[in-house]
Amino acid sequence: MQEFEKHYNGSLVEKEMQKYWEDNGVYKFKKDPSKKIFSIDTPPPTVNGKLHIGHIFSYTQAEIMARYKRMQGFNVYYPFGFDDNGLPSERLVERENNIKAFNVPRSVFCEKCIETTQKYEQEFKDLWKSLGFSCDWDLCYSTVSKTSQKVSQKAFIDLAKNGHAYIKESPVLWCTECQTSIAQAELETKEIDTYFNYIPFIVDGKVLEIATTRPELLYGVVCVFVNPEDERYKNLIGKTAKVPLYNFEVPIIADESVAIDKGTGVVMCATFGDATDAEWYQKYNLPYKKVILPNGIIADDVPYIAGKNVFDARMEIVRLLKENNLLLKSDKITHMVAVHERCGTSVEILPSKQWYIDVLNHKDELLAMGNKIKWNPASMQTRYNLWVENLKWDWCISRQRYFGVPFPVWYCKKCGKPHFAKEEDLPVNPLEKEYNGVCECGSKEFVPESAVLDTWATSSISPLLNQEKAKEYGLDSDEFIPMGVRTQAHEIIRTWAFYTIVRSMYYKKDIPWKEIMLSGIVLAKPGEKISKSKSNATLSPKELIDKCTADYIRYGTANVKLGLDTFFDEQNVMETSKRFINKLWNSSKFVLSHLFDFNPNEKVELLPIDKWIVEKVNKTVKEAQGYLDNYEIGLARKVIDEFFWADLCDDYIEIVKDRLYKPEVHGEQNRKSAQHAIFYTLLTLLKMYSIYIPHLTEYIYLKGFKDIVGEKSIHLLSWPKVENTDAELLEFGKLVSDVVGDARRYKTENNLSMKTEMEKIEIKTPNKFMEYFKQTEKDLIACTSAQKIVYTEK
RNA sequence: GGGAGUUUAGCUCAGAUGGCUAGAGCAUCUGCCUUACAAGCAGGGGGUCAUAGGUUCGAGCCCUAUAACUCCCACCA
């Protein structure tokens, strides 16, 4: 037993423990045929700037589970990753260097990206290390690494060859700010104020009123739709309407998706105002009239508004309409528009040639996959189902961006047929390498694809990326996927979870992982997400750790129910943690100070009350285990806390204190009984707490337990195994606790010190506990300062 | 408009399969320096369990409505 400092210095100890773990390779992954693998598919955070407390929450919950599974005897494969390619990283680089990707040479830009993301990745790593994460950093992957690119490109080629990925010229969701196509999952909605403008089209010389929010697209109008059931307009079907201001004629067509009661019941269809326009465009094979360019500027050949941006163009058209008495009415409305989640810009729809992964044809299969996965909490599956059921677009995976995994594709210059790189040449950047081959059409000239893959297209194969690494450890790929569990926040179900399932459905025809653990997100205050733009995060994670230590944060953030959003009341959480850590420190100090002469090998028959605390801690082990098996780390912490505070500290320690101090009064054997009980109980308790507060528990373990137990780290011990608990002993313990409680209450109510002597205590007990009480009598007399105890039968 | 979640003490939250007097921490009040801890201990006060019905011997929990808040999806004509 080593000396205990009066006060626990967390900041110092934590660094010391982290170094100890690293020096001893405590969390190193090793292949071990005697243990089952439990692999964790951790989220590779997007490298887009600073981390905030929300990350800590979600990652810490997963980390606690990793420790638990390790203690359960699994060989835990717990890697870490970084999602460091794609738009989020590009935007970070643009911000930090005050450049725009399309204004600098591609190679220069990508170099900047590597430089910047690596800087941040080091910060991330340092942060996770300082939180005491038990992942093995040798298993780390990055989505932009050569290996990841290779795996990603190969997976893409497989998809394309099997017909699950295809290239197609069609209207696509487009961000004019980022100048790239995007996918449905990257949309957010934003409420904006705008005007519903009523404009006269002319049919047979008569006015046909049409309402629109997008008058700037008048030049792009290709037809007019009415509902075939609409009595007002039935007679117009098949005729043509003249577009105001531009005076060209377009056909009037009937379609049942037109809402009769919306606006005037007549819709102008432009290329493209919204998703419905795009649907009609394809359904009726309408012509395309270009109005908006990929950069959001109106095309040169559009009269009146060429060269303006969309908003200015709209204003100008409205002005012209007014000037020509063509604006019949203009109602102010508020509506939701789709914006790009990364930049907040309104999304346009433009025709272009893009790569897609087929999802719309496999909705049933995707839903079936969802059913095979265990969702924790179960209710989260509904979100997944809802997303799958409501999908409208296939997954567009090409991005007209720079820093990402390139498409390993060249197109025949003559016939356009795509040609894929050979597997042995991967990873490849077609912009830097010629395609050597001949097209079936005879041509030998090829054009490289310049787009890069959607970031999600690479992060969605995280099981494959991990598997690639796992091969180095001799792990067979069939035993690796499905992985054990995916841990992530519920807000990315529609992206990361969904996409991962899609990919796995294709490459494995199976689920990517057996279970998924969905954590909630952290709100700044009820109902408000923490975000950089609102600057509502209090302290940065780093500041928080410097101020409070990792164990404080870990213990505090463990107080959550799985899947529920929570809001972080820094002061409250930290006060609670501080109080707890202090209590555990002091109680351990007390316990171990009485174990200096403890002989664990000596067999001693335990006194009833000592048996009780052993039973009680065992019962707690089982309860906590029940919760942890369902990923409920908060509820598990709660039952452990209850045991620790109420049973161990308030009752048991107070009851055996005197026996530990005074063997001359209580007898040497009885003191040994207490030593056995308290040694086992504290060790068991520390094991349970070790998943929450790895530093402090390790520190205490090293001081007082290591020499006896033998293992070099508490984190290499197994979760305590317990048999069925003895209900009778637990009942007896409750009675003892009541006796002590009554004595305390009596003193408090009479404003007496706890040391005040009492003449006698009367205990009513069932006969079966009479003997137990007799054996506990000396403890009770010492604990309550009673002079004698009398018993009556209940 | 569709779906999910939430609603329990002043605050933050626990309360499997319906069953003692509905719990914890914080806050508040009272008392106590007790050889681990005053960063502590002991105790008290405080709740019509969102509302209204219903099922049941019995409802915080189940059913039906309603309300408020949150999230997801849809809604640009």
Image (cartoon, rainbow, N blue to C red):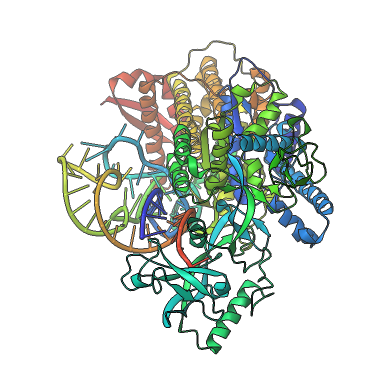
Instruction: Answer left or right for A603 relative to A145.
Output: left
Query: Which residue, as the protein is rendered here, is positioned at the far front?
Result: A442
Instruction: Answer left or right for A552 relative to A763.
Output: right
Residue at 77% over, 61% down: A100
Q: Is residue A526 something one can see in this rendering?
A: no
Instruction: Answer left or right for A733 relative to A562.
Output: left
User: Is A156 situated above or below A344?
Assistant: above
Q: Dividing the picture into quarters, in which one does residue A156 lie?
A: top right
Residue at 69% over, 22% down: A30
What percent of the width, then of the height, locates residue A171?
A: 58, 57
Q: Is residue A21 something one can see in this rendering?
A: yes
What percent of the width, then of the height, locates residue A84?
A: 72, 46
Q: Dividing the picture into quarters, in which one does residue A220 lie?
A: bottom right
Residue at 49% over, 51% down: A392
* Quadrant (top left/top right/bottom left/bottom right) for the C terminus of chain A: top left
User: Is A207 situated above or below A26?
Assistant: below
* Quadrant (top left/top right/bottom left/bottom right) for the N terminus of chain A: top right
User: Is A456 situated above or below A300?
Assistant: above
**Closer to the camera in the image, A18 or A126:** A126
**Closer to the camera in the image, A244 or A15:** A244
